[in-house]
Image (cartoon, rainbow, N blue to C red):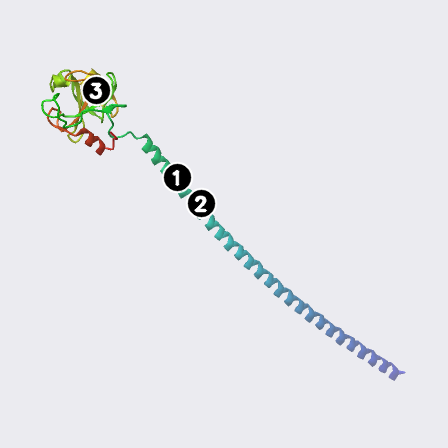
Amino acid sequence: MSQRVTSRSFRTSQLRTRATVLAAGLGVSVALGAGVASAADTTAASGAASAVQAQAAAQAKAAKAEAVKAEKAAQAAAAKKAAEKKAAAKKAAAKKAKPSWVDPVKKYKLSASFAQNGGMWQSTHSGQDYAVPSGTQVVAAHGGTVVKAGGNGAGDGPAYGNAVVIKHGNGTYSQYAHLSKVNVRIGQVVKTGQEIARSGNTGNSSGPHLHFEIRTTPNYGSAVDPVKFLRAKGVKV
């Protein structure tokens, strides 16, 4: 009886030992499997993170390139707009700007010319005649100061009738003669194109016209060719 009990007890102990070993082995297998799975998950997660980072870097690079492109386009558009604005302003200024010199009368016909011979003058003609009706507006060919005005040729003699002399810069003077009316006084400052008188037929004149001179002094005897002078200033005479 004792031997049977002992034998049975031994077998039971062996079975328990085997079960323990089996359980332990199974636990190790499960643990190893879990470790392998965990390593695989970590690798996958690391790969996904790298892919996300690469995609983000690519997107950032593309966005930067687009921003640079947009900035260049904006700068080019701004430069074009500024150039157009400058050109428009320059064109408007040129259109608005008044000419430096102008004809003393409008709608005229040139008659006696500078240095022309004739019985009407002591020697040769000292200016350019503009054939216009009496009362035609006479304007300052250029801005300046009136230094002579009135009858008796404004001091140059009765042959000129009523006359005006204007002093301009650089030693240049303009003279207007045979006037029917003088509208300025000595010392008055006038602008280019401003009315100074009305044409007439006073003095030594064969008909209504404006006698116009360009001089180097305010007095008779210093005249130069007025048509040549005005054309050099851009006036179409």
Q: Determine whether 12 is above or below 158 in the image.
A: below
Q: Nearer the viewer, mark 1 or mark 3?
A: 3
Q: Going 44% across and 45% down the picture, which residue do you hit?
A: 74
Q: Going 87% across and 84% down the picture, which residue do you hit?
A: 3
Distance between the alpha carbons at the discs numbered 2 and 1: 15 Å
User: Where does the image place residue 148, in percent across and percent down from the top left?
Assistant: 15, 20
Which element is circle 3 on?
Answer: loop
Distance between the alpha carbons at the discs numbered 1 and 3: 47 Å
Circle 3 Cα neighbour tier, 10 Å, few/some/many (<14 / 14–19 / ≥20):
many
Q: Name the amino acid, label 3.
A: His
Q: Name the amino acid, label 2.
A: Ala
Q: Name the amino acid, label 1.
A: Glu
Circle 2 Cα neighbour tier, 10 Å, few/some/many (<14 / 14–19 / ≥20):
few
Residue, disc 1: 84
Q: Is residue 227 left or right of residue 222?
A: right
For the view shown, which residue lies furthest in the bottom direction?
A: 3
Q: Determine whether 3 is above or below 209 in the image.
A: below
User: Where does the image place residue 139, in percent across and percent down from the top left?
Assistant: 24, 22
Q: Going 78% across and 77% down the picture, which residue do you hit?
A: 18
Residue, disc 3: 209
Tell me which label, 1 or 3, sits earlier in the chain: 1
Tell me which label, 2 or 3, sits earlier in the chain: 2
Which element is circle 2 on?
Answer: helix
Residue, disc 2: 74
